[in-house]
Structure formats: structure tokens, C-alpha cells
Image (spheres, helix red, strand yellow):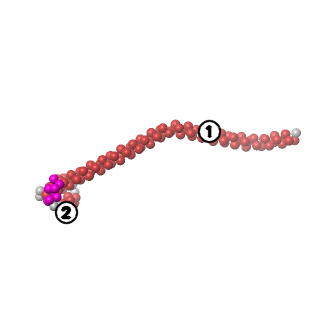
């Protein structure tokens, strides 16, 4: 009888602790399941958003490259026009005004110019 009483006392002391541990374990399992379910629900959305962002980055990169190519072509064209005008005897100031280019740029391009180079470029 004494053993039964001692067993009940021990059980009463351990019961709250065991209940607390079981509740904590159940809470962890539930939180893990909820997190897993949320991740499964969010994954397609996140993938779609990431794909959209990547597509935007690709478009921006291609647009930037295209603008750079256009800028290079415009510079080459302007340079040819400057050389040809200079070869025909136009003053650098007038070339600058007509082409709406900074005088310093026209002067720089004409600095090492030879008339033979203009004929070759035409």
C-alpha cells in the first residue's frame, strides 16, 4: 500500500512535467507542419516572382547593351561626318555648331586628322 501511495505521489509530481513536454513536442510538430504547408503554398508564387525579376534583369541588360551599341554607332557616324567636313575645309567651330557637338570633341577628333584619312573613310 505504501508503494502505491508513493507511486501516486511520484505520478502527480511527474504528470505536469510530462504534460508540458508533450505539449511542447506537439507544438513543435504542428509548427513544422504549418511551416511546411506554407512553404509548399508559397513556393510557386516565389518562383514566379523570381522568374519575373530575372526576366526584368535580362530585358534591362539587353536594353542597356542596345543603347550602348546605338551610342557607339552614333559616335562613329559623327566622327566620319566631322572628318569629311573638316577635309572639305569647314572650320571646327562651324562643324561643332552644325552637328551640335561640343567644340572640344570636334577639336580632339580633328587634331590628328589627315585629308587622306577622310577620303579613305568616305
- Residue ID at (41%, 44%): 54
- Residue ID at (34%, 46%): 62
Q: Main secondary structure of the magenta part?
A: helix
User: Would residue 80 be visible to someone looking at this image?
Assistant: yes
**Nearer the N terminus, badge 1 or badge 2?**
1
Between 95 and 118, the residue placed more toward the observer is 118
Whether 118 is among the magenta residues is: yes
| Image location of residue 64, percent across then percent down | 33, 48
The circle drawn on residue 112 is 2
> What secondary structure is found at the residue carrying circle 1?
helix
Label 1 sits on residue: 30
Between 117 and 33, the residue placed more toward the observer is 117
Q: Quadrant of the N terminus?
A: top right
| Image location of residue 91, percent across then percent down | 14, 59
Q: Nearer the viewer, mark 1 or mark 2?
A: 2
Question: Label 1: how many residues lie within 10 Å, few (<14), some (14-19) or many (20+)?
Answer: few
User: Would residue 94 be visible to someone looking at this image?
Assistant: no
The residue segment tinted magenta is: 115-122
Q: Is residue 75 left or right of residue 24?
A: left
Amino acid at each position: 500500500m505504501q508503494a502505491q501511495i508513493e507511486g501516486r505521489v511520484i505520478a502527480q509530481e511527474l504528470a505536469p512535467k510530462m504534460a508540458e513536454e508533450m505539449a511542447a513536442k506537439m507544438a513543435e510538430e504542428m509548427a513544422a507542419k504549418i511551416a511546411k504547408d506554407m512553404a509548399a503554398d508559397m513556393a510557386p508564387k516565389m518562383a514566379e516572382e523570381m522568374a519575373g525579376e530575372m526576366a526584368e534583369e535580362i530585358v534591362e541588360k539587353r536594353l542597356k547593351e542596345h543603347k550602348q551599341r546605338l551610342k557607339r554607332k552614333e559616335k562613329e557616324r559623327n566622327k566620319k561626318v566631322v572628318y569629311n567636313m573638316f577635309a572639305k575645309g569647314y572650320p571646327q567651330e562651324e562643324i561643332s555648331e552644325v552637328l551640335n557637338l561640343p567644340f572640344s570633341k570636334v577639336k580632339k577628333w580633328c587634331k590628328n586628322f589627315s585629308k587622306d584619312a577622310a577620303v579613305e573613310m568616305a
